[in-house]
Amino acid sequence: QGNTVTWTLGNVAAGGTALVVAQAKVKAGVADGSEITPSATLKPAELSQVTTVVGPTLTVLRRPLLKLTKGIDDLTGQHLFPGDQMRFHITVANVGNAAADGLAIVDELGGLALDDIVVESGGTLGGSTASWQVAKLEVGQLVTVTFKAKVGQGVNNGAILVNQATAKPANGELAASNQATAQIDYPTLAVAA
């Protein structure tokens, strides 16, 4: 009744055991970091002494949890040449149990040989960093942001472009995407003398 669960057990022999189980859900709205310490009291009918058993303290986790997926599409098609245009897309999903507030999505592009970067989806480009701001991402929602760029002219055949994005809400932890890759792969012509 209320927050109390009561069991009435039959006789338990000396050295014997009895198992009782209670399941409960944490109330909606309990703050992140709140602690819950379960306890139980045992009182044999023939004794006046009460024994209290305290369980381990549980910490309530109420926070956003981000899952990032990054991919690269060759917009030119077939082989990837220097000068070909690619679209990079980053999808952020909130798989936690609280909204992600003040979400910042960041993609550092300084290590990539890219030209003519155009940030889409309302983002900005500062130096070699593409970034997007999302005011709120509710539980179960996702958002996808994109940018376009051309493969640099000096990239060698066979080179692999590797890129990873991150996202961090103001009320949560930093999360990173998978490492998206694109290989420069185009046919070459060998001329025999």
Image (tube, rainbow, N blue to C red):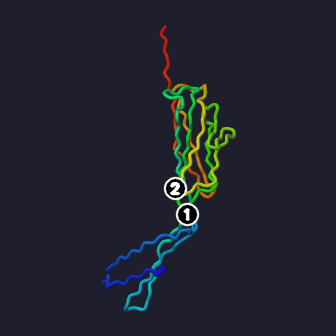
Q: Is residue 161 above or below residue 175?
A: above
Work out whether residue 189 or residue 26 is closer to the camera in this orientation and state it.
26
Q: How crowded is mark 1: few (under 14 residues within 10 Å), some or many (20 or more)?
A: some
The amino acid type, in three-letter code, at marker 2 is Gly
Above/below status of 181 relative to 51? above
Q: Nearer the viewer, mark 1 or mark 2?
A: 2
Mark 2 Cα-neighbour bin, 10 Å: few <14, some 14–19, many ≥20: few
Q: Which residue is drawn at 57% across and 65% down?
A: 32
Which label belongs to residue 137? none
Most extreme residue toward the right is 126
Name the image quarter holding the N terminus. Answer: bottom left
**Residue 72: where, in percent of width, then height?**
53, 37
Q: Residue 140 carries which label?
A: 2
Residue named by callout 1: 62
User: Under tag 1, what secondary structure?
Assistant: loop
Q: Mark 1 belongs to which amino acid?
A: Arg
> What is the spatial separation of the Cα atoms under label 1 and label 2, in whole angstroms?
14 Å
Where is residue 182 shown, x and y percent of the image?
52, 34
Q: Nearer the viewer, residue 52 or 38?
A: 38
Q: Residue at x 60, y 33 (%)?
A: 149
Left or right: residue 5 compared with residue 167: left
Indicate whether 92 appears above or below 112. Answer: below
Image location (x, y in percent) of residue 51: 44, 84
**What residue sits 65% from the left and 41% below the top?**
129
Which of disc 2 and disc 1 is earlier in sequence?
Answer: 1
- Residue 153 in the figure: left or right of residue 188: right
Snapshot quadrant of residue 85: top right
